[in-house]
Amino acid sequence: MKRTKEPTYSQDAQKALENHVLQSSLKKLQNRFGKGVMEYWAAKDDDELRDRVKRRRMSTIENLDVVLSLLADNVQKAGGHVYFAKTGSDAVKYCLRVAQKNEVKTVVKGKSMLSAEIGVDKALEQQGVEVVETDLGEFIIQLAGDAPSHIIAPCIHLNRQQIGKLFQEKLGIDYTDDPPELTRAARGALRRKMIDADMGITGCNFACAETGKISLVSNEGNIRMATTMPRIHLALMGIERIAATMQEHQGMLQLLTRGAALQKLSTYVSFVGGPKSEGDPDGPEEFHLVLVDNGRSKILGDPEFREVLACLRCGACLNICPVYGRIGGHAYHSPYPGPIGAVVSPLLFGMNQHADLCKGESLCGACLDICPVKIDLPRMLLALRHKLAYGDAKWQARQHKPSEAFAFKLYRLIISNSMFYRLALRCARLLQKPFMGKSGMIGKMMGPGARWTNDRDLPPLAREPFNRRWKKKHSRNQKRNNEVNHG
């Protein structure tokens, strides 16, 4: 996913730290949803719900071939089409074939991270198809030519004044920063697209194998319109986003809406799974379900990372993460930002390509505490770091930054040998003198050390090591005690 000549993780992180609008929005988001969800988990009546849903998720994932087969059978019985796409490219080609066969000119979309993962929008636009996002946040992002910065709040890096200017420029309305007015303008523009659209493309929150239905949650009603007004509905679904039974599905839905936005239930929950029947007042004439693998089977085959497939995509880990809370989502260079993105992106798109993500996380464990299904992301972040430190043939991971590995080996050699350690300390005391300021602190360093002193001063090494001072003090006390004891 990462393109050449893109800004690096560090560059985008620095840019985010200087963005006052983003910093203010992230603080509000984490104070409201991050803290709110943690308080809810601590006070909820059913302490076992999260563990129960997690056990069922893992059981279903470990029997994925069986439940996916049952889902496909039930969708086809209802008159729908099912396509298994091994890669993202296969999924895109299938979407293009459906669009070309039905002479599609306009597509309206419901928010889908999977569509961003496989790049279906760009492929359709290259074929002359107009693609319109209908989720308000995604619509704003599309108008701005920008990228989402949060899983459920894609335009959190923009404020209402910036959106007002954007709407004035792109929609031709008078400038306003009044949220109801801005929403009304977006609704007017999107309703016309909904009426004219030939095909609706959505993601899939969860599918239920038992019923053959997929469920879609939203708070705006756009997804229900995108799935019922166009004559074709095509749903993109990662193969892991499935429940075996309605009972399992119910628990997942409960935790999803609580974890995402502290809601008991979202405003709209739609269940779809086939074309409209004779006599139905609305619904698509064709329904296509595209089951996308694109690297998920490889994750499934590795017990070390399989657990990450249980993710509900609620975004709760973003709302508590101290790293995401400072740098936002753009630095991750992936449709999946935050702690979950720091694990999923290297596994799906390449460990070396996204090596900075797992190294940038703090390992504080807050993502594990807030996750509705208690996914142990810190453990997997450490596993990724280990593979990048030593290389891993199974994941085609090369050793990342060999010079860094050499530096740590040298450090280990020095601290494990007392003679080398003392010699290194003496050299360091001499070398630090040119960098010490009038305050007695080290205010400026060279090379990699400069990145530490750009934002803070470092205390210098003590003139005399602690062990030597201890011996001096102890010998003085011993001498004094001897003098007292001998008169």
Image (tube, rainbow, N blue to C red):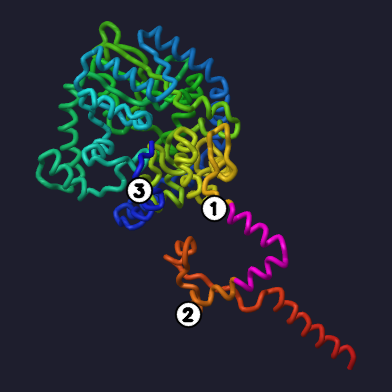
Expressed as whole percent of the image width and height from the top left, the position of residue 397 reads 53, 38
What kind of element bears circle 3? loop
Residue at mark 1 to residue at mark 3: CA–CA distance = 22 Å
Query: Going 46% across and 81% down the picture, which residue do you hit?
Result: 438
Reading the chain from its start, which is encountered first: label 1 or label 2?
1
Q: Does the magenta portion include 409? A: yes
Tell me, yes or no, whether the highlighted magenta stretch contains residue 116: no
Q: Nearer the viewer, mark 1 or mark 3?
A: 1
Q: Nearer the viewer, residue 3 or 75?
A: 3
Task: Decide: is 2 above or below 122.
Answer: below
Q: Residue at x 44, y 38 (%)?
A: 259
Kindly identify the amino acid type of the residue bearing the numbered disc 3: Pro
Name the residue carrying label 3: 7
Q: Does 100 sit left or right of 429 as displayed?
A: left
Mark 3, residues whose alpha carbon is within 10 Å: few (<14), some, or many (≥20)? some
Q: Amino acid at mark 2?
A: Ser
In the image, the segment drawn in magenta is 406-427
Residue nearest the viewer, comparing 468 with 235? 468
Q: Under tag 2, what secondary structure?
A: loop
Find disc 2 in the rendering and name its residue.
439
Q: Quadrant of residue 148?
A: top left
- Which residue in the structure is indicated by mark 1? 403
Name the amino acid type tagged 1: Ser
Give the structural element (helix, strand or loop) at label 1.
helix
x and y, in percent, of residue 49 in the image: 54, 33
User: Residue 42: x and y, percent?
Assistant: 52, 45
Which secondary structure class fits the magenta region best? helix
